[in-house]
Image (cartoon, rainbow, N blue to C red):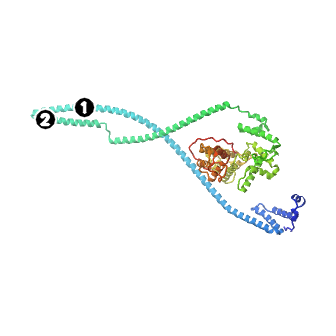
Amino acid sequence: MILQNRKPCSFPEWQSTSKEQIAASVAKPRYLEELECHLRKELQSLDLTKGKVQELRLQPYREVFEFFMEEFRTYKPLLASIKNEYELTIAHLKEKIRSLESVNVILATASDQYTRQVLALQEQEKIEITELKKDRIYLLKLIDKMREEKCSLETQVSKMRKTVAAEYLRYLSECDARKLLLIDLNEMYRQKEEMKLATTVLEHEGKGEDSVKVTLALKMARQDLTKAQVELNTLKANYGDVVPRRDFETQEQKNHELSEKMQILQKDFEELQEEYDTMLEIHKQVSEERDQFYNDFLDVQRSSTPRPYWGKCAEVIPGGVERWQTLSKGKTSDQLVDVLLEDLGAALLREKDTFVALGRSEKVPVFLRCDGMVRNKKLTKKEVVAILREIWKEKMTIDLQKGRRTSLSEFFLNFFQRRYGDAIAFDWTYTIFENIKLFRTNETMSLFYRILIGNLDEGVYHSHLQQLTSLLRELSIVDSSNTGQLTSEQFSVALKSAFPSKTEEQIQELTESAGYKLENPEDLVMYKLLFLEDEEGKTEPLIAKLKKQYNNDKKSYLRELRAELGTLEEVRPDDLRAAFVILDPGLAEHILDTYISLAFQTSKDQLDPAGSVPLETVMQRLKAGDIKRQGIPVQTEPKHTIPIAEESEVT
């Protein structure tokens, strides 16, 4: 299409005419209409089903821009330089995108490789844990067997002691009897020899030998006989009970082995005695706690009021019995009170046509700072949740463009000012604020309200989003065939990859909340449906369980931190830093600086090392922030802990 050259409206006439007059009296220039018509036709003729749709749409705009430059030759150099700069920028961005595509491929390959390595390590750890459990069972059986052997050996030793004592007494009696017999035998032998000698002397006398010589020989023979007899008796008395050396060494070796076994059994017995004493002490403490809890239960039972009959509320609540059963299902008495207050408050809120403004005082939040009366937009719960989602979406986009996180209270007002103007922006802020202040049980409203009034850091909201994004990414990786379904084992593997710091019990809780049952491990679940949220902001049980675990881990972390700080009443930055490092060695330096800046409400550069803040203030500020453990928990010695005030669950 060839565009005819036409002159635009003259500059002095356009300059001297207001915008309203131009819109009312002057129509569009003919050349502008032809350009717009040409652009629409070109855009309609494009085939947007092919690749590179944005480049195809850009080409008609380039042609129109060139026609415009050719028509207005006075501005052509400036417009041409602008076009060149945009073309250079687009070319530079295309080149950068091409370079980043190769990096994405490398990152995807590395991610898959490391995921496989992590899975392999986890399988190896499971095998090692199984082997260790088997070894433990074997050792326990061995200990029981050794205990039985110890009892048997003790019984045998006792019997052997009694037997040895009886044998010793018997040997003593036999020794004394032997000595008496030896004395009698020697006496009889002496008498026999004397008789022989006397007979011999008589024979010699008969033969005429020398009697003196014979008498002397007899005397010497008697002396030798007496000496030999004494030595024989001494040897028999001293060595009569002696056993052979070989038997002695055998018995000595057996005694040594039994002594070693006895020492080992004695050591095992002492360890068992210590364990028994420990268990006895624990049992004593548990018994005392049980008695204390029972007394507390009796006190509460005496002082508690009768449980109310909540069925009466069905007659008052709009919707009757069916709506009340839906609202009260699975809720405690405290939660039912909140439900009643919300329902009654919503009815009163719908009856109001206006709100009284709080004025322009500095104490009033910026999004409520106005005078006079503001209108009530009378929004439903679904409409409020939809608006809050739009606010979060637009705020994250603007924060990403600016490179920093802006205040939610200021952005809350600016959002309605940009959309509806300054005149009625406060009608929307007051209406939204009154609704989210009323519906405390709604997760979306409650979280937005606490962040808006400053009771909770915005990082908690982004931390929840990051958790869900990480989990969905890991589930998609495990679902390699992209069927949208996973078994319980695959789901558990994805959970461990997404949350490596969670315990086995927490992983099991998340698996059960997703709808998997232990008796049917092969059941398939559509995991993408677990991330859905209804129009009123109600989430699935898996998301609620993730948030509950986040809150419990945060409370436990802060409780351990407070115990680590001990009895300090005033906390300095160095004290808090040392406590964090001891409690969580895996904490990165920049995250540690963020936690300390949050606790002392100042930046890292303006932090005063000598300044101190009360401990309660520090704990309240940390409780409002996105505080979570970065490393593996370290087992420390138990200390005197001061319980932290319970925090309402973050939605």
In the rendered view, tell whether residue 178 sits above or below residue 106: above
Name the mark on residue 214.
2
How dense is the environment of label 2, judged by Cα within 10 Å: few (below 14), some, or many (20 and up)? some
Q: Residue furthest left?
A: 208
At a point 73% along the width and 42% down the height, the residue shown is 440
Coordinates of residue 3 in the picture (x, y in percent):
85, 67
In the rendered view, tell whether residue 51 sits above or below residue 525: below
At a point 64% along the width and 32% down the height, the residue shown is 297
Location of residue 255 by image quarter: top left
How far apart marks 1 and 2 lie (CA) works out to 28 Å
Amino acid bearing label 1: Ile
Q: Do the residues labelled 1 and 2 touch (CB within 8 Å)?
A: no
Location of residue 305 by image quarter: top right
At a point 32% along the width and 32% down the height, the residue shown is 172
- Front residue of this view, candidates 168 and 14: 14
Q: Name the residue under label 1.
A: 183
Residue 417 seen in this snapshot: yes
